Image (cartoon, coloured by chain):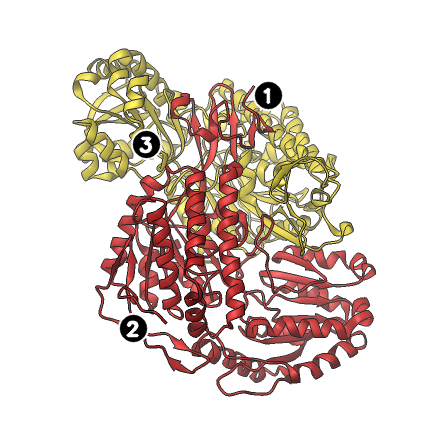
Chain colours: A yellow, B red
Amino acid sequence: MSRTSSTGLQLIGNHFSGEGDQLFRAFDPVQQQWLPTEFREATTGEIDTALTMAAKAFIAYKKTTSLQRAAFLQAIAEEIISLGDELISVASSESGLPLQRLQGERDRTTGQLRLFANTIAEGSWVNARIDTGTPDIRQMQIPLGVVGIFGASNFPLAFSVAGGDTASALAAGCTVVFKAHPAHPHTSHLVATAIRKAVMRTQMPEGVFSMVHGTSHETGQYLVAHPLVSAIAFTGSFKGGKALYDTATRRAVPIPVFAEMGSVNPVFFLPGILLEKGPALAMQLLQSVTLGVGQFCTNPGMFITPSADAAAAFISTLQQGIGHATGGPMLTPGILHAYQQGLDYLQQEGVQVLGAAQTVPDQATPYLLQATAANALEKPAICQEVFGPSSLHIHAGSIEEVYTLARKLEGQLTATIHGTEEDLREHAGLIDILREKAGRIIINGFPTGAPVNHAMVHGGPWPAATPAAGTSLGTAAIYRFCRPVCFQDFPVYLLPPELQDHNPLGIWRLVNGTFAKMADS
Amino acid sequence: MSRTSSTGLQLIGNHFSGEGDQLFRAFDPVQQQWLPTEFREATTGEIDTALTMAAKAFIAYKKTTSLQRAAFLQAIAEEIISLGDELISVASSESGLPLQRLQGERDRTTGQLRLFANTIAEGSWVNARIDTGTPDIRQMQIPLGVVGIFGASNFPLAFSVAGGDTASALAAGCTVVFKAHPAHPHTSHLVATAIRKAVMRTQMPEGVFSMVHGTSHETGQYLVAHPLVSAIAFTGSFKGGKALYDTATRRAVPIPVFAEMGSVNPVFFLPGILLEKGPALAMQLLQSVTLGVGQFCTNPGMFITPSADAAAAFISTLQQGIGHATGGPMLTPGILHAYQQGLDYLQQEGVQVLGAAQTVPDQATPYLLQATAANALEKPAICQEVFGPSSLHIHAGSIEEVYTLARKLEGQLTATIHGTEEDLREHAGLIDILREKAGRIIINGFPTGAPVNHAMVHGGPWPAATPAAGTSLGTAAIYRFCRPVCFQDFPVYLLPPELQDHNPLGIWRLVNGTFAKMADS
């Protein structure tokens, strides 16, 4: 592993800074040892400087064209690739995730940057609306300002320094102060250096991106409470997201927090499909539950069957399968500890163990648990997320109980239904209930795996996310960091090109109520 | 004035209810007397019933087609017209607003309902996004649920029972529980009966709209805190909006509050145009300040000039003009009292009186006040909204001071700049600053008068509104009450028509990243 003198420091604008004296190190969960590199926690002075530079950079950055920002995002993707294998090996040692998974995640990250680059380069994303009456009114989306972004532990690349939140904020024209996740500081450092190179190469204003380290809640809270921040993006636990939300909404000037806080992602199995292919579905479910040691926001943490008869072969296959499932090291000792505590809690609450894999020291053991629908309705706490490779089977006594359970669900990132055509036609009402509960509804699939495209929604009603009207994946994520503004009776020399009569950018616009790509007639 | 036995009661679903024993009456600010009709405050039980019916109605209402909802909105407009002159005379007696103004406001209200009807009938508003890969993902906007809406005092028709918030919520597919403004309960009652008739005529589910009366903050807070409410819309004071925001964000399940809380709507005059046509601008400004006794959210409560020399003729015209300006009765005695208190406060803080109209008992007197930019920078409180026919002249010592003042402004609904072409080209930087401060930027016009169309933004950064990314006027207002959901691998028989391959509604969609109106190829 190569070392540079800047490793361990904050990136403030294009410069590295190490004013603080609080040090921390990352832990290798596979080798079960602390990694050698020491990182410095950011001081409040360093955070102030990063934010001041970000606010100043915003004045220039908001005036860049979509094409300039697209080139910047493309350059970030290229510089990430240029980091080469070091990025993958460092990320693996800090997260315990396998190299192949991290190579895939790097592709996802660069693909995401390029997707946003292409979207803004096309230009129609600004939602231009023109009404040419008297007065003449023209609306478009403009960036909010400086965005504070918190990296997630479970995707050290795709939901971290140059992940979807950063990509969508920079695409929108916002500047970013990034709070690195303390579980993968070196990975974060490398990606930050890639962004720094892209900033300099594409001549973006210094301060458009800064990154600070910190292990304490205070660092994060300081960032959220700071008057120069206009919005926050966060991916992580409910507890973490809720704490930031509370701070942001109690500020003198409240700001939006776009928090993705996870969910149990219920999977409903209908009777016909259970009879038709219960054992095959059981194997697919097990694979989804244990994929990546269950460390996905969309891990199926709960599945529901409507009757003992229909589910018999499905359940017995699960019981056999779970014994042969493989767990693995988790991202951090804290996450492993929380997983074990979650399983203990469920068992204390009377939840049965349906089966478990073999225990390996310092690794997460895959578990299947079981409760009745009556238990779940009586004690909703047993339906809350246990982050890791386990899933809770809810055994309903009847299809009516399945509906009741669905109605009582709290907000989810995803909800899934498995059924034959006959099942699905008969239970369209169940799908209708689930539509109110989640951001993504899946038929005959599994929630793990969320493609990044234009149509994806990764979000949902509280407590899965806030606000419900947001997504942290897909190109619609850009709208979190924008607001509409309208220009009344502006002479053409003051109008942004997006709103000029002759439509110089050739974008789609709503002109006097009609979508058009031509110049105004 | 005709009387019906239901007047004074809540409208709960399609039935009138009067369980409470707390009575109140409206006040006629022109006649200076209490009006005879007694209204009953809603009990918490009545609010519970309204919300329970609204939640039940939502299950059916969200499944109505856009065309069905468009017919419902059209029917509401028709039924409002059918109320005839009684609506206008009742509204005038309760608000003190002239008949002609209220006739215009009725047109605005019915026009707004029809604009939303046409927008949803066209259908593209759902922002359909289709990615046909593996998996197949299809996104559209869906309604949030039950919306609680608070009527404003200053537009007893257009920002009240069937105003823009109700129109956009019903258009989106949300059901509504409306809290009537206690200053115009009889007007509210009449419009509610019109909506009731439209509900029955177009066979909308009972409970899609209910209206409750209440004079206390408790009634409003009870509605906002209720678990069955999914979003709140409010137009009124900062204090009122902030109280609802605090309640909504501290709930166990927080909900969004779309609050339009007013602003001072600064108007900047640049040197060239002051020299060129200062006196004409002064007369136009006076008209805007005193229009409707200054009772508009977009009233220009502050105007800024850069130098004494350039502004001399402008100011002397203002001083002459204000003496001949006419005030009038305000909407309520409370609003008149607050206006007078606001003026007293400014004078206590050392703000000069530039001129005033003649005082008439029980009426608001138009005022022009004056402070230096240094005063305003030192005491930002003097720049806060005084609701009524007054405006504060900020007399800057230099153009640099104008920029400094602009940078220090808090969030505004509107910001206006008057300038010659030379002024505007020279001070594009000022426009750039103001773009960050307001939802609508106006060149060479006045902020009063906000057309309802597709491009209008009536909102802005805190404290003008929350969230900054919203508008309470114009067709984009519908998105406040929606969230995106995506459907993964749905068979065609389960997909909403908006997302089916053959595009049966013929709407614009983003298909694999390209806007298209045709069926998928």
Q: Pick the residue in front: B266 or A261.
A: B266
Type of amino acid at the residue the image marks with label 1:
Asp
Q: CA distance from mark 1 to mark 2?
A: 78 Å
Q: Pick the residue in front: B218 or B205.
A: B205
- At x 78%, y 78%, the residue is B313
Type of amino acid at the residue the image marks with label 2:
Glu
Q: Position of residue B460 (x, y in %)?
A: 56, 56
Q: Position of residue B387 (x, y in %)?
A: 53, 72
Q: Which residue is mark 2?
A: B38
Q: Is residue B5 above or below residue B390?
A: above
Dot 3, crowdedness within 10 Å: few (<14), some or many (≥20)? many
Q: Secondary structure at mark 3?
A: helix
Residue A361 visible in the displayed image: no
Dot 2, crowdedness within 10 Å: few (<14), some or many (≥20)? some
Q: Which residue is mark 1?
A: A85
Q: Is residue B141 above or below residue A317?
A: below
Q: How many marks?
A: 3
Q: Which residue is mark 3?
A: A339
| Protein chain holding label 1 | A
Q: Nearer the viewer, mark 1 or mark 2?
A: 2
- At x 59%, y 25%, the residue is A111
Q: Pick the residue in front: B371 or A287.
A: B371
Q: Secondary structure at mark 1?
A: helix
In the rendered view of the protein, which quadrant contains the N terminus of chain A?
top right
Q: Quadrant of residue A392?
A: top left
In the rendered view of the protein, which quadrant contains the C terminus of chain A?
top right
